[in-house]
Image (spheres, helix red, strand yellow):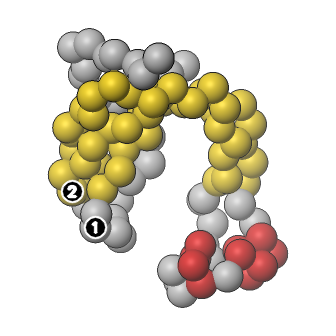
Amino acid sequence: MNILLVQNNRYLEFDKDEDEGVGLAIVDFTRFSTWTEVEHSKAGSIVTLGRDWKKGYYKWEINNIRILKNPIFCKAKKGIYEIEVDSIALKD
């Protein structure tokens, strides 16, 4: 499965929030697990943004990072979602 990493400038707080984003790289998820309350408490405010822990979040391990030659402008949303892409060129 090819996963497009999308960067945006505004923190998306609610599930229906959207922002203008840019896809910068294609990656593979190689492992994931539930993010626990203990891990949250050890992570610090830079990671948690000072927010309380809640159930339903995961941590991901990514590999095989392929940087795009040209960014893909798209909507940024929370979570994993599908986007239509005409073509993708990767950096050498």
Q: What SS does tag 2 mark?
A: strand
User: Is residue 16 visible in the rendered structure shown here?
Assistant: no
With 7 as the anchor, is 66 left or right in this view? right
Mark identifier at residue 19: 2
Residue of label 1 = 10
Splitting the image into 4 quarters, where does residue 81 fall?
Answer: top left
Viewer-closest of 73 and 36: 73
Splitting the image into 4 quarters, where does residue 12 fall?
Answer: bottom left
Viewer-closest of 91 and 66: 91
With 73 as the anchor, is 38 left or right in this view? right
Labels 2 and 1: the sequence-earlier one: 1
Percent position of residue 30, x then y: 71, 31
With 81 as the anchor, is 36 left or right in this view? right
Q: Residue furthest top?
A: 87
User: Is residue 61 visible in the rendered structure shown here?
Assistant: yes
Percent position of residue 88, x then y: 32, 16
Q: Residue at x 51, y 80 (%)?
A: 49
* Marks 2 and 1 close (CB-CB < 8 Å): yes
Viewer-closest of 37 and 1: 1
Q: Residue at x 77, y 79 (%)?
A: 42
Instruction: Give the alpha-carbon distance from disc 2 to disc 1, as whole Å.
Output: 7 Å
Quick check: 59 above or below 26?
below
Quick check: 83 above or below 9?
above
Percent position of residue 8, x then y: 30, 56
Q: Residues within 10 Å of mark 1 (few under 14, many from 20)?
A: few
With 71 as the anchor, is 3 left or right in this view? right
Percent position of residue 64, x then y: 63, 26
Mark identifier at residue 22: none
Splitting the image into 4 quarters, where does residue 17 fall?
Answer: bottom left
